[in-house]
RNA sequence: GCCAACGUAGCUCAGUCGGUAGAGCAGCUGAUUCGUAAUUAGCAGGUCGCAGGUUCGAUUCCUGUCGUUGGCUCCA
């Protein structure tokens, strides 16, 4: 009895009963068979050697199919496990899933793998690839699986098998002498796995739980072609070259010291950028109707008890005691803003009230999780809290959305992703209020025509939040801004306003930030622009490079004129050749280099060299400076 | 916090199978006055992260500690 299957182009193909995906591909052409890694049967990915059901819709999966990369990487993780088992028979296998950009495999070992081990393992993987073992699926009964893994000593696998829900088919894959529990599908043959690389080794808890045994995790990646792999490795290199920790040191922006772990010290050049970011936000605050407040650093714990931080956020806070009173350093500004709001009686006519605060915050982060400027223990947010009447919320949200997009656009972050994070397990308040708050945010976004994704359980303890992510120049996502609705804090602090009908109501509080933490933002910005800051932010905007001592005075005049215009300019009077001066200025990523020689001095011009565009020729001084000034004023990115 | 790796001059790094260290760049001094990514010579610079231990002797070996880095969500 022949069967028939329908291909993506709607053509129908007759096959003998029991024919597999491989048979189908073979029938169409040997080249296709060679290119096929798996097959989609009625939308489900399957191995090529599985018999096709009659009347199904099928599509062969080749390297052109986006799903195929995951299959390839998953198979490569098995290849890794096989190599490890060959070289280290005592190693027990954990799990080996596909992740973004690659895969990993966890092993339980006595001695952790070293980077040298990785090379050996990778070589073994290549060997197994060359041996071209057929990879075959073997369905197996639960009791068989338990016995099999038990006898192999693979106790982690036994645990996994035991956790597979009853009634589910248990499967495994055999390639050569290696058998692994796996749901599949896989590529048909280890010979298909050629372009891969093991990247690093790290520790991971079994099933991500700190109470469990620690396993040795090997990360790697794989691609269809060596070219794609090389490109990917190049991207990793590029990311490394842009690392803000490296650039921060090279450009003299900030440093870290053991005396204050995970707490940046901004040097003069870093502080310039930092302060410019604050100025930038202040300028917009004036237009958007915010007013700035300044609040204390250390506050009595009683306030943190009122706000709920003492209950829900204590493990991230620093405490100190003086005169037998316990104080905590603020990890957030919101409660202090509630205190300010509470000092006066407010009319509905006064709302919304928008308090902005650039106060320094301190949050204790576990020592293993801090990282450069992006995860620190002290930072400052472009923080503000909006107190408004419930009916004003949507308008506030809408204007915030346009505000935030305007800010991001200034930095060239034109792709923004939005995520709605909903109630976490650790939270205050009733579910009714949470429903209200979550709906308010979701509705607000829908009305503003914004697309967003939901992330359940990731909200703050006092309210749901919208998170704004931008993609940087390397297309990496970073979370920056946030908008949170909070019904609880105003309630807890007993905040009120008088409504038009002379009754009292409780205002809603919106927590919001655009850049997020200035420290983190600076880190992201450094990586985004690879240290070549836009002219308005560059710590040094111009450098004047006299070629000979004869033009020192003229060079000094140029410097003076630029300074008078408010530009940040340096004059390089070192006894060096122009080439050296240019090289140093380039490495410092100074936007404009002004080369001054006898010619310029005689003609009253400057020869302009731009850090990216190179030599731009001689220009009239005023015209050039005016153009730079314009660039600064309009904040060209 | 846990696991692993790392910590040598201001920076980037080499080195010592245990006998108190070396380069390039930066710095200082001098010569050179030079057209778009490193002119040149000399000099100076280190309690080899910190604290213990082993040893005749430790930067090297051991223990502890501090810091940094990579991870610790993506379920067979």
Image (cartoon, grey):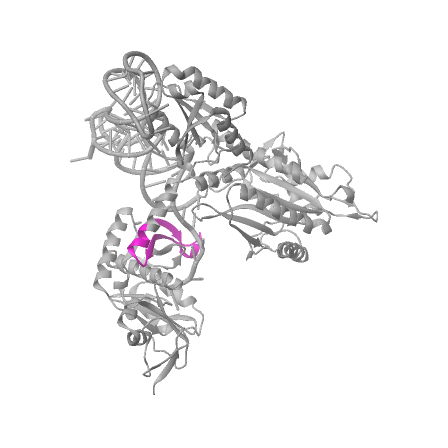
Q: Estimate the x, y position of residue B71 in percent, counting from the top left.
A: 40, 49
Look at 51% across and 32% down and name the residue there: A273
Residue A385's place in the image compared with A83, above or below, is: above
Look at 35% across and 73% down and name the residue there: A140
Q: From this viewpoint, which residue is outermost toward the right?
A: A502
Q: Estimate the x, y position of residue B63 in percent, counting from the top left.
A: 33, 38
User: Image quarter for residue A91?
Assistant: bottom left
Q: Estimate the x, y position of residue A212 in percent, counting from the top left.
A: 42, 54
Residue A472 in sight: yes
Q: Is residue A206 left or right of residue B45?
A: right
Residue A384's place in the image compared with A394, above or below, is: above
User: Image quarter for residue A572?
Assistant: top left
Q: Is residue A3 left or right of residue A281?
A: left
Q: From this viewpoint, which residue is outermost toward the bottom?
A: A1
Q: Estimate the x, y position of residue A48 in percent, counting from the top left.
A: 33, 72
Image quarter where the N terminus of chain A lies is bottom left
Tell which of A298 and A598 is nearer to you.
A598
Residue A90 in sight: no
Span colored in magenta: A201-230
Tell which of A126 and B28 is nearer to you.
B28
The verdict on residue A221 being magenta is yes
The verdict on residue A225 being magenta is yes
User: Image quarter for residue A186?
Assistant: bottom left
């Amino acid at each position: 009895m022949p069967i028939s299957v329908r291909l993506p182009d709607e053509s129908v193909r007759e096959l003998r009963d029991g024919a597999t995906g491989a048979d189908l591909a073979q029938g169409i052409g040997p080249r296709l068979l060679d290119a096929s890694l798996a097959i989609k049967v009625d939308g489900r990915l399957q191995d090529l050697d599985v018999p096709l059901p009659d009347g199904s819709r099928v599509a062969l999966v080749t390297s052109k199919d986006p799903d195929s990369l995951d299959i390839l990487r998953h198979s490569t993780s098995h290849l890794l496990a096989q190599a490890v088992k060959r070289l280290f028979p005592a190693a027990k296998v954990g799990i080996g899933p596909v992740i973004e950009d690659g895969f990993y495999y966890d092993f339980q070992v006595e001695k952790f793998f070293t980077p040298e081990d990785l090379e050996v393992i990778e070589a073994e993987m290549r060997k197994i690839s060359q041996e071209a073992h057929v990879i075959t699926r073997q369905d197996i009964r639960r009791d068989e699986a338990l016995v099999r893994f038990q006898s192999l000593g693979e106790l982690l696998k036994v645990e996994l098998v035991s956790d597979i829900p009853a009634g589910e088919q248990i499967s495994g894959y055999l390639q050569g002498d290696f058998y692994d529990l796996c749901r599949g599908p896989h590529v048909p043959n280890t010979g298909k796995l050629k372009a891969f690389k093991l990247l690093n080794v790290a520790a991971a808890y079994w099933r991500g739980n700190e109470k469990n045994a620690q396993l040795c995790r090997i990360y790697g990646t794989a691609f269809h072609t060596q070219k794609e792999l090389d490109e990917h490795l190049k991207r990793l290199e590029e990311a490394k070259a842009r690392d803000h920790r490296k650039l921060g040191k090279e450009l003299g922006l900030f440093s870290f010291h053991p005396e204050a772990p995970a707490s940046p010290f901004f040097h003069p050049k870093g502080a310039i950028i930092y302060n410019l970011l604050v100025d930038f936000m202040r300028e917009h605050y004036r237009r958007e109707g915010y007013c700035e407040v300044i609040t204390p650093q250390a506050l009595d714990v009683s306030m943190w008890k009122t706000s709920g931080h003492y209950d829900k956020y204590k493990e991230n806070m620093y405490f100190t005691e003086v005169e037998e009173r316990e104080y905590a350093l603020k990890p957030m500004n919101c409660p202090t803003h509630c205190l300010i709001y509470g000092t006066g009686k407010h009319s509905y006519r006064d709302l919304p009230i928008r308090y902005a605060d650039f106060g320094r915050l301190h949050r204790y982060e576990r020592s293993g999780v801090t990282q450069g400027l992006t995860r620190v223990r002290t930072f400052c947010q472009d923080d503000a809290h909006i107190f408004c009447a419930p009916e004003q919320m949507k308008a506030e949200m809408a204007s915030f959305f346009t505000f935030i997009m305007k800010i991001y656009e200034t930095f060239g972050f034109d792709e923004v992703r939005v995520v709605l994070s909903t109630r976490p397990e650790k939270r205050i308040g009733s579910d009714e209020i949470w429903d209200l708050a979550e709906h308010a945010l979701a509705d607000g976004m829908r009305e503003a025509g914004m697309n967003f994704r939901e992330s359940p359980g990731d909200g703050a303890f006092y309210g749901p939040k919208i998170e704004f992510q931008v993609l940087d120049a390397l297309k990496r996502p970073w979370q920056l801004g946030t908008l949170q609705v909070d019904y609880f804090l105003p309630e807890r602090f007993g905040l009120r306003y008088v409504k038009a009908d002379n009754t009292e109501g409780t205002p809603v509080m919106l927590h919001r930030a655009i850049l997020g933490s200035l420290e983190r933002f600076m880190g992201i910005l450094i990586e985004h622009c690879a240290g070549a800051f836009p002219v308005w932010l560059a710590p040094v905007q111009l450098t004047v490079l006299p070629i000979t001592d004869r033009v020192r005075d003229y060079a000094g005049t140029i410097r003076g004129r630029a300074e008078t215009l408010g530009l940040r300019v340096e004059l390089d009077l070192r006894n060096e050749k122009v080439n050296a001066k240019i090289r140093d200025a380039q490495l410092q990523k100074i936007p404009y280099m002004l080369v001054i020689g006898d010619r310029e001095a005689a003609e009253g011009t400057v020869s302009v060299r731009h850090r990216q565009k190179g030599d731009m020729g001689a220009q009239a001084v005023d015209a050039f400076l005016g153009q730079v000034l314009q660039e600064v004023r309009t904040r060209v990115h």
